[in-house]
Amino acid sequence: MSESKQTNNKIILSGIQPTGVFTLGNYLGAVKNWEHMQEEYLCYYFIADLHSLTIHMDAAKRRAQTREAFALLLACGIDLEKSLVFVQSHNPCHAQMGWIMDCCSQFGELSRMTQFKDKSAKHPDNINAGLFTYPALMAGDILLYQADYVPVGADQTQHLEFTRDVATRFNHTYGETFKLPEGYFPKAGARVMSLQDPTSKMSKSDENPKATISILDEENVILKKFKSAVTDSESSVHFSETKPGISNLMTIYSAVTGKKMDEIETEFSGKGYGDFKAAVGEVVAEELRPIRENFKRLMNDRAYLDKAMEKGAENARRIAYKTLTKVEKRVGLLLPTK
């Protein structure tokens, strides 16, 4: 990663959990935008394996998925010469900062987090403390790197506001320390919905395999899933809240091709849903083909991935340590002499 970029650009930070292969929703809503952002901003991207600990998982599986997630970011076009990419747990500053943010967070505001309520309802047998304090660790992730912007989807805005509140409280109590990060909102593809239930967000945990596109799906699988996508009884391709299935397909088509909704409507005027579904499947398959090929190549070069992770962690620790040391001094921790 170029040192010159570190002084010339605003900082964007974002993380993604290693909970399995990215869906098309993860890619279009986040990762595809990350590739473009690295041309304009100084970007820090991390695999949020500490956050994934709120979900019980086989240890070997978690390690494998962490490695795969790192490789997937590179396969999707994240350039190590332009961006910092690292694994969260490889930088101990995150856990230390997370505890300090815990102590700056109020029980009441954490209890109001809608994601905690949603995930608790989905996993009533595992409502752990980490799930409750998750936003404090997330705040620590962001503030450690003095990020200017954080790419957020519709379901993450509350966590960003929480981060800003905690940073403001810390600055007021201990003195000016943190920047207040702002949201970075992608224009298209921010919310890709299920192909079988277009009123629900596309999710890798969906029990219906037809509902989700994995970015590593083979071309024939992608085409088949789009062919069976749920739409409506009409036949005209136009964007409307009353047509969630077609609107979702148009959102996907727009995010991949860059075309506006009115252009898509004109392109498919007089054509049926079958033609449109096939077209969406084809552009998605072509978009994902190089990612699938790059991923296979990277996973076959373990030495390269290990070296890339080691270098990323080293740079992340160097950057984060400066902020953590300042924070520790502000709150009155006695720092080791060496």
Image (tube, helix red, strand yellow):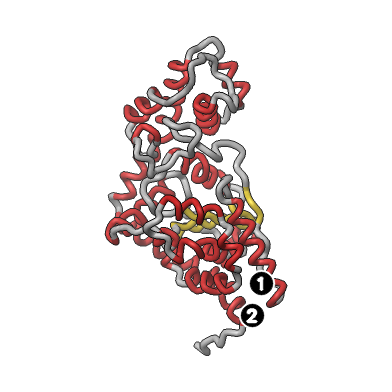
What secondary structure is marked by label 2?
A: helix
Instruction: Name the residue: 55% across, 53% down.
Output: 114
* 59 left or right, relative to 280: left
Relative to 26, does residue 167 appear above or below in the rendering?
Answer: below
Instruction: Name the residue: 54% across, 61% down.
Output: 135
The reply to whether residue 322 is in sight is no
Could you give the CA–CA distance between mark 2 and mark 1, rounded to whole angstroms? 9 Å
What secondary structure is marked by label 1?
A: helix
**Residue tagged 1:** 170
How dense is the environment of label 2, judged by Cα within 10 Å: few (below 14), some, or many (20 and up)? some
**Contact, mark 2 vs mark 1 (Cβ under 8 Å):** yes
**Residue tagged 2:** 330
Q: Position of residue 101 (x, y in %)?
A: 57, 70
Front-most of 102 and 178? 102
How dense is the environment of label 1, judged by Cα within 10 Å: few (below 14), some, or many (20 and up)? many
Instruction: Name the residue: 49% across, 68% down.
Output: 94
Q: Amino acid at mark 1?
A: Phe
Q: Amino acid at mark 2?
A: Arg
Relative to 99, does residue 7 appear above or below in the rendering?
Answer: above
**Mark 2 or 1, nearer chain start:** 1
* 116 left or right, relative to 125: right
Circle nearer the viewer, 2 or 1: 1
* 338 left or right, relative to 52: right
